[in-house]
């Protein structure tokens, strides 16, 4: 295993989604910004045959199934992919290439060995797969101070998607319950942002502003996410924006006692509305200490430890 990956000689290629609307684009944007800030050489390229010329023999190439039509698999680089299956045409090429690692989103069913550095991430050596939540793209030195929010705020912004699918994995019903619970307190729910209107969606800074302007800034999830303990990025982003972790997802493994949790959304809103400003501030400060392990910088460091057999 190559253990020569150091910051000074790293070259990372993010393959695809540079100008394409997709939820995974936010993940690539997060890695791109974090790597640039660390002084790492990073190239974000289109899913195009011409992009192969950017790859070096010592590159780390990060790709995803939704942008892999022209994914270049050559001898030499290390490949890290999301959702590309071994039986797919690209997966078969990667299997032959050999230096292939995978990432999957963390759930309560994720197998493998726990992270020796304290995050909830797991790594399964047999299939070279790292299971982890994405976390926040905001760096620790950019975390915002907790907000002394007026309890008279009457708006709640939801930055992102409200959706469902045939498997009922979405959040539509949960959001409607949340909307109604807020209405009972005179708080208006308003959905903004997302990638439907423009490729990049709302910027992280604008996202933070809207969350900070919200009465609660809670991370509400649907039943599938709740049952599988799938951590949404918004719960990490809210904390990095200076807003406490409040959710109907049992996220105690990450947030411990800093989490205001209630499975019942109506009761969650009741408890959150009754919380004092001082308690909100204390919970935020505690949560910000805990999510230092869940920035995109920390996520990339986990990827390097996976590659370097240093788990």
Image: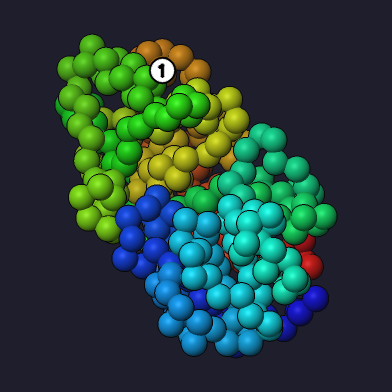
Question: Which residue appears at 45% of the width and 27% of the height?
Answer: 166
- Residue 126 lies, with reference to residue 73, above or below; the image says above
Left or right of 155 on screen, residue 296: right
The location of residue 171, given as percent across then percent down, is 40, 28
Q: Residue furthest front?
A: 89
Question: Which residue appears at 42% of the width and 74% of the height?
Answer: 48
Report the colour scheme. rainbow
Q: Quadrant of the N terminus?
A: bottom right
The location of residue 8, given as percent across then percent down, is 58, 87
Left or right of 311 on screen, residue 52: left
- Residue 9 lies, with reference to residue 125, above or below; the image says below
| Residue under numbered circle 1 | 265
Question: Which residue appears at 75% of the width and 59% of the height?
Answer: 128
Question: Which residue appears at 40% of the width and 72% of the height?
Answer: 46
Left or right of 152 on screen, residue 49: right
Mark 1 element type: helix
Quarter of image, res 151: top left
- Residue 118 lies, with reference to residue 259, above or below; the image says below
User: What is the count of numbered marks?
Assistant: 1
The location of residue 35, given as percent across then percent down, is 48, 73
């Amino acid at each position: 295993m190559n253990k020569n990956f150091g910051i000074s000689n790293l070259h990372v290629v993010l393959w695809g989604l540079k100008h394409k609307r997709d939820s995974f684009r936010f993940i690539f944007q997060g890695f791109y910004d974090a790597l640039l800030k660390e002084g790492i050489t990073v190239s974000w390229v289109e899913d195009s045959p011409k992009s192969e010329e950017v790859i070096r023999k010592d590159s780390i190439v990060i790709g995803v199934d939704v942008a892999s039509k022209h994914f270049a698999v050559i001898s030499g680089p290390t490949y890290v992919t999301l959702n590309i299956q071994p039986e797919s045409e690209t997966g078969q090429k990667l299997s032959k290439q050999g230096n292939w690692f995978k990432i999957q989103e963390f759930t309560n069913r994720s197998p493998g060995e726990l992270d020796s550095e304290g995050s909830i991430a797991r790594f399964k050596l047999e299939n070279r797969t790292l299971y982890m939540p994405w976390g926040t793209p905001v760096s620790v030195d950019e975390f915002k101070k907790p907000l002394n929010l007026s309890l008279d705020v009457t708006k709640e912004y939801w930055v992102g998607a409200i959706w469902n699918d045939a498997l009922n994995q979405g959040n539509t019903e949960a959001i409607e319950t949340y909307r109604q619970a807020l209405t009972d307190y005179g708080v208006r729910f308003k959905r903004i942002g997302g990638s439907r209107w423009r490729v990049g969606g709302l910027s992280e800074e604008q996202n933070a502003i809207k969350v900070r302007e919200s009465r609660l800034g809670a991370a509400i999830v649907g039943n599938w996410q709740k049952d599988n303990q799938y951590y949404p990025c918004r719960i990490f982003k809210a904390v990095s924006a200076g807003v406490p972790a409040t959710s109907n997802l049992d996220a105690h493994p990450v947030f411990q006692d800093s989490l205001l949790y209630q499975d019942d959304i109506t009761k969650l809103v009741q408890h959150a509305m009754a919380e004092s400003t001082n308690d909100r501030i204390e919970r935020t400060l505690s949560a910000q200490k805990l999510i230092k392990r869940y920035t995109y910088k920390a996520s990339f460091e986990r990827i390097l430890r996976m590659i370097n057999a240093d788990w």
